[in-house]
Image (cartoon, rainbow, N blue to C red):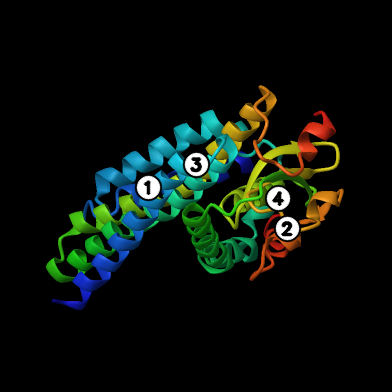
Amino acid sequence: MIAFLVTAGAAFLMYLILTAGSGTIGFWSLSELVMGVLLACLTGLIARNFLCRSKNYRLLDPRRLLQLLVYVPGPFFVELTKANLDVAYRVITMKIRPGIIRVHSGLKTDLGIFMLANSITLTPGTLSVGIDEATNDLFIHNINVGEGDEKREVIESTELFGLANLPAWIRRIAE
Amino acid sequence: MAAIDILIYICLTIGVVFNTLGVVGLLRFPDLYTRMHATTKATTFGSIFTSLTVVVYGLYLFFTVNDSQYLTLAIHAFLAMACLAFTNAVSAHALARAAHRSGIMPMLAVVDRLAEAKL
């Protein structure tokens, strides 16, 4: 039941966002609102077992959602900008020293690993290639492996980010 | 020239410059993985800024002309921006993983822990 409500609510919210500006009740017309409720219920019936597969409703906590909203335009965007300046520098100068390293994530849930892998792909010089599902370690292709780092067996995930501690943010949001 | 025009030109310039750098990187880097760095990161940033231009322009027209179709334009461009950023990261991971599993090893690599782990 909770899974149905969550899925239908998310679908209705998405429908409202997509049809904003269609009428005079708030931003919406009456026909869009009725159609939105009907379609949201239908989507909830069909898709409830896909969106809530893990039966874990951590992300319904408003504090976590608020942190997610701060995380994306805040520390994440700063690292994204830095990553792009870094890649631009390497495209122009061709100073590269590539390699695949093992990174210890320290996260336990699927959602946390998913967010960390995506954040790593979009931030400085790193691209996630594989996951060791037994230990939840990530394999990262780094475009510029630091001197001496190629001899170390495991690297902590916090060492990949210079300005903000993204793994700590992800742990607060997802775990 | 109004301030809004300058803001729009700045966003467009950043977007186009980074998209161009992505293409240059695609041509210059030696192998698949390094090329993915250029194409995923630079084009994500470039596309974010070109979409941001549309968002800014749509919001500006919505507040001056007060026609709700411009609000729709801004919101849809914003959603496109969010989808681009996340699908880019996911598809980059899928491509890199598939390439490594099918035996394409990184060129010039100083270390390859994934090949050593034999997953």
Q: Give left or right: position of A32 versus A167.
A: left
User: Do tags 2 and 4 sit on the same chain?
Assistant: yes
> Label 2, label 3: how many angstroms apart (C-alpha)?
29 Å
Looking at the rendered structure, the kind of residue marked 3 is Thr
* Badge 3 vs badge 1, beta-carbon distance below 8 Å: no
User: Do tags 2 and 3 sit on the same chain?
Assistant: no
Quadrant in which the C terminus of chain A appears: bottom right
Quadrant in which the N terminus of chain A appears: top right
The one nearer the camera, A76 or A36, is: A76
* Badge 1 vs badge 2, beta-carbon distance below 8 Å: no
Residue A132 appears in which quarter of the rendering? top right
Residue marked by disc 4:
A112
Q: Secondary structure at mark 1?
A: helix
Above or below for B58 versus A51: below
Residue marked by disc 1:
B80
Residue marked by disc 3:
B87
The one nearer the camera, B56 or A12, is: B56
Looking at the rendered structure, the kind of residue marked 1 is Ala
Q: Give left or right: position of A78 versus B72.
A: right
Chain ID at mark 2: A
The one nearer the camera, A2 or A22, is: A22
- Please report the residue visible at 81 percent of the width from the left and 57 percent of the height from the top: A148
Q: How many marks?
A: 4
- Please report the residue visible at 19 percent of the width from the left and 54 percent of the height from the top: B69
Q: Give left or right: position of B24 versus B106.
A: left
- Between disc 4 and disc 3, the foreground one is 3
**Number of other residues with Cα within 10 Å of mark 3, as a class: few under 14, some 14 to 19, many 20 or more:** few
Q: Secondary structure at mark 3?
A: helix
Residue marked by disc 2:
A146
Looking at the rendered structure, the kind of residue marked 4 is Gly
Do we see residue A16 in this rendering?
no
